[in-house]
Amino acid sequence: MSQPTYEAAVYSRTVKYRNHNGQDKEQTLYFALDPIALLRVMAGANFKPTRSKNPARTGDVQELSEDDMLRMLQELAARAAGWPSEDGESWTPYENFANEVAGKAFITQLAASDGDRKEFSEKVIMDPFRSFVMFAEADSSNTPKDIQEFKVLLSQMENIFKVPVKEVESIEDRRARLQAEMAALEQPKDE
């Protein structure tokens, strides 16, 4: 397998806000996050086992509370915010992102919009981590077990950062799902 090309992807979003002096402003914000910084944030996350009694979700990866998810997105946005250099070779962090009105406007927009959250998650979080997994696969010194661990982590991250798609459930599917959930609830717990 040939060595993949590292892509220093940059996501940009323009936010409009009114500052503390009542002035209407517009600012383009830039975000880029390398996989190592992402792993550091993920390591500090407070994951909980899934609470679902649905047998289809038994053994699901951990989940985050809404509060923890928002906190993680805020931290990821703050770590990812910055500016690319003119030549594109370096990245200058936005040092006070979380305290600036533009940063607060972005976080508010991110928290309020499933579409914006999905786009941010894909471009800033998932795409760089997928590249990381491709690099791991291309490195012949990694064992299959190592690569599998990275793929499992990628799968967990995809589950954490996905925005649920609301699907129309047929009556038959709903009945089957509810029966399975009821059966799972009625089974005695082994303690």
Image (cartoon, rainbow, N blue to C red):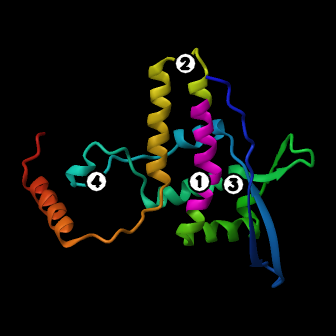
Instruction: Count neighbours of disc 2 (C-alpha within 10 A) and say few if under 14, some if 14 to 19, many if 20 or more.
Output: few
The CA span between labels 1 and 2 is 26 Å
| Residue found 42% across the figure and 65% down from its top | 165
Name the front one of labels 4 and 1.
Answer: 1
Q: Secondary structure at mark 1?
A: helix
Disc on res. 51: 4
Amino acid type, mark 3:
Ala
| Distance from Cα at disc 4 to Cα at disc 3 | 30 Å
Q: Earlier in the sequence, mark 1 or mark 2?
A: 1
Answer with left or right where residue 121 lies relative to residue 169: right
The reply to whether dot 2 and dot 3 touch (C-beta < 8 Å) is: no
The quadrant holding residue 131 is top right
Q: Residue furthest top?
A: 141
* Label 3, label 1: how far apart the Cα atoms are: 16 Å
Amino acid marked by disc 1: Glu
Q: Which residue is mark 1?
A: 122
* Residue on which disc 2 sits: 142
